[in-house]
Amino acid sequence: MQLSPLQSRLAASVIASFLVIVLYLFLFAPRFAVAADFGHIPSSLDSDGDFYDIDDTVGSFDALGPSYEPDFALFDRSIIGRAPDGTKPLDADRPTKGNISPGNTIGYVFEVASVSGRSAQWPETSYELRRSLVGPRASADDEEDDELSEDSVVVARQASKTLYISANTCDQPGRKSPDQTTMDPPQLTLFVSTSNDNTSPGPDKEQGAQKAIVFDEGAVMYNTSFDGDVYFSISAPNVSEDYFSASSLYNYEVAVSLSGYHHSYDTVTQPNLYWVDSDTSSALLTTRNLTSKPNQVISTPPYTVFVQNTKNLNINGIKKSYCGLTNWAQIRPLRDGSSQATMGLRQGGVSNLTMQEFYITGLNASTNYTGIVALNTNSTLQKRQQGGSGGGVVVFNPIDFNTKPSKYLLINYVGTMLTLVSDGACTFLFNLTLCTETRYAVPGNPDKFPNGTALAAFYDEYTQTMWDNFDKVLQQTPCQAPATQKYSLARGCDDCKQAYKNWLCSVAIPRCEDFSSPDQSYLQMRNINKPFPNGTLVDQGIRDAFGQMKAYNSSRNLEIDDKIEPGPYKEVLPCDYLCYELVKSCPASIGFACPLPGSRFSFNTSYAVPDTDKKLSCNYPGSAYYPSSATAMGVSWASMAVLVLMPLLLAS
Ligand SMILES: *[C@@H]1O[C@H](CO)[C@@H](O)[C@H](O)[C@H]1NC(C)=O
Ligand SMILES: *[C@@H]1O[C@H](CO)[C@@H](O)[C@H](O)[C@H]1NC(C)=O
Ligand SMILES: *[C@@H]1O[C@H](CO)[C@@H](O)[C@H](O)[C@H]1NC(C)=O
Ligand SMILES: *[C@@H]1O[C@H](CO)[C@@H](O)[C@H](O)[C@H]1NC(C)=O
Ligand SMILES: *[C@@H]1O[C@H](CO)[C@@H](O)[C@H](O)[C@H]1NC(C)=O
Ligand SMILES: *[C@@H]1O[C@H](CO)[C@@H](O)[C@H](O)[C@H]1NC(C)=O
Ligand SMILES: *[C@@H]1O[C@H](CO)[C@@H](O)[C@H](O)[C@H]1NC(C)=O
Ligand SMILES: *[C@@H]1O[C@H](CO)[C@@H](O)[C@H](O)[C@H]1NC(C)=O
């Protein structure tokens, strides 16, 4: 058919237009659907099924990117699938458990197709996608060129993502005998390959083509950037049948994520757990402040605590594994919700911040323990929207603590059974009425005060009497007077009251250490002429040397000796700055005075100088075994003490 020039130009332009439309539909039409579907994503995050359906539609979007993969909805994964047999696909943020027998390897693949377009999981990019898709294009269709380049930018940002692989060992082969202490069960190994040439990494493959990471105390964390599928495997070593029951399996949990490790352990920051004090059978542990302002509210205690007798080897090899500790730690939360650890939130301390406390009972006397705190932030929609790690577990560094020795065994002959009847003199005390910050072991006597309630009542009554007397005296000083008649412009009666309370609670309620604890400059022997509860006396040499001195042969307040009769003990001396602060804050007319450090003797038996190199160097409200120098809290306490102390030392 002959066409006139005009007709042929018309035909050409019709054909061109048609091609443009076809091209347009091919390239962009699916994305209108995407744009519409994106609106549903937040609600469909809850039900993962819907969400994955969307993935495939969005797959075409990646076709524009440099990391082109034929992941169209048309070709589903079963056609393209390259994963070798037996390799399990693992989706992001879906922790999976597995059993593995020694000497075997289990392979996994993280398919890049499983995340294409799961942009809602990456909040930053999701925002950009929405802007470029819904924003300009909906309003102006003729800016395609701009949008193309905009899209390329978006895709380019997606191209190099980081994959976080993490795993925890939940069970490991058991020891043949608990006495077998020479060897811990060997660790699992993670093998990772990002190359299609090595789709089943493992111990038998050439090491250059893969990365091998041995678990550390039952935990592994590895990240890699990826633009294709990532192959990895968990491999169990051969286990010596001489030492371990070879029939038993390893059990592990593995997870991949694009936003952070699902299983992590923290060896960099502080253990986040501190030992406050203990007596013969219980201990109090605390976290640092969980808040930074007094008015911040935390409703549920976030941490979990695990405690293990250091002689018990069950958690050796899995100390950084959350599920390992959950299965094997001696003291752990039980499935029925009970635990030997009672926990709660407490607001207090100098800054009036919230901390989480753990009161551990049922411990053995004179025993060393390890405490480990862990966090389980279950994955929630909220977390993801905030760009959080998508939930997971964090295990912190362990701390060591111990219990005090049992003072005496009263032996009951019931057949041949020996019964522990009485515990040591130092009894852990907390929950006092006036001295709310007092939470440590105090001189006690299990025969006269069989339970903490009765002992607390004694100290409460005693401190309350002292407080009432002080209050009467303070009322006679001109507190409410106009500024010109006040005793001090800088300090008021409230400062004086607070300083007196801090001093009174530290001085009237001695912090008790067992008499057997090694000598320290901050430990003062008390009551040494009295017999121990088992009837024996303190070493003759010590009694000859110090028995005549009041500071050694009695308690600081005689009522303790009269009413409690604790026997000999050692007192952790109060910090000197508590006294200086009292003298500075209260009217001189009340007549408080501190022993001068120059008068070395009475000073040494009454107060101790804070020492940042020691975990505990003197007693103050809220004292605990904070790591020397390193902690924020330890430092702030100590520097506060030095500030208070310096002017006085210089002046004297
Ligand atoms: C990723 O791994 C590298 C070394 O392999 C490491 O330096 C980096 O800290 C890791 N990133 C994260 C977030 O753990
Ligand atoms: C604890 O309190 C201090 C200030 O007293 C603050 O700087 C710190 O951030 C708080 N810790 C946490 C974990 O919020
Ligand atoms: C206490 O000691 C007994 C006997 O040695 C032991 O079986 C038990 O596990 C110990 N308990 C704790 C919590 O240390
Ligand atoms: C997270 O929470 C869901 C539902 O609330 C629960 O089924 C799942 O077991 C939890 N995961 C962990 C690790 O606690
Ligand atoms: C009595 O108790 C003291 C202090 O705990 C201890 O050193 C001593 O060995 C005990 N004596 C007897 C006979 O148990
Ligand atoms: C603390 O004492 C109050 C009453 O004085 C009591 O109701 C509460 O149960 C005590 N708390 C603990 C943990 O013992
Ligand atoms: C505590 O001891 C006192 C006697 O000192 C007794 O009256 C009281 O019932 C005891 N309380 C408990 C809970 O055992
Ligand atoms: C007091 O304690 C200091 C430091 O611990 C020591 O050097 C000094 O000798 C002691 N003085 C007396 C009299 O014990």
Image (cartoon, grey):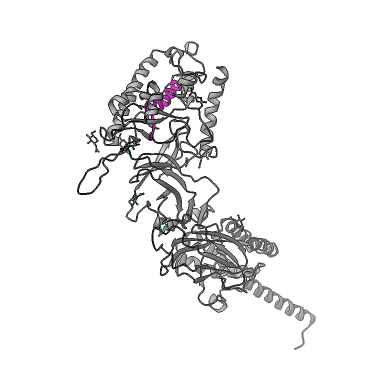
Give coordinates of residue 115: x percent, y percent. Answer: 55, 66
Q: Which residues are magenta?
A: 492-517
The secondary structure that dominates the magenta segment is: helix
Depth check: give the residue in front, 196 or 282.
282
Q: Is residue 109 left or right of residue 550?
A: right
Could you tell me how many numbered marks the image carries? 0
Depicted 474 relative to depicted 355: above or below = above
Depicted 393 relative to depicted 279: above or below = below
Give coordinates of residue 504: x percent, y percent. Answer: 40, 24
Depicted 272 relative to depicted 530: above or below = below
Residue 10 figure quarter: bottom right
The residue lying furthest to the bottom in this view is 1
Quadrant location, the N terminus: bottom right
Give coordinates of residue 327: x percent, y percent. Answer: 39, 58
Please indicate, yes or no, whether residue 169 appears anywhere in the rendered image: yes
Quadrant location, the C terminus: top right
Depicted 121 relative to depicted 512: above or below = below
Depth check: give the residue in front, 119 or 334.
334
Q: Is residue 70 left or right of residue 241?
A: right
Please tell me whether residue 164 belongs to the stretch shown in magenta.
no
The residue lying furthest to the left in this view is 415
Q: Ligand 6: which quarter?
A: top left
Depth check: give the residue in front, 98 or 236.
236
Give coordinates of residue 106: x percent, y percent. Answer: 50, 71
| Residue located 68% across and 76% down the image | 19
Please tell me whether residue 508 belongs to the stretch shown in magenta.
yes
Please indicate, yes or no, whether residue 94 appears anywhere in the rendered image: no
The residue lying furthest to the right in this view is 5
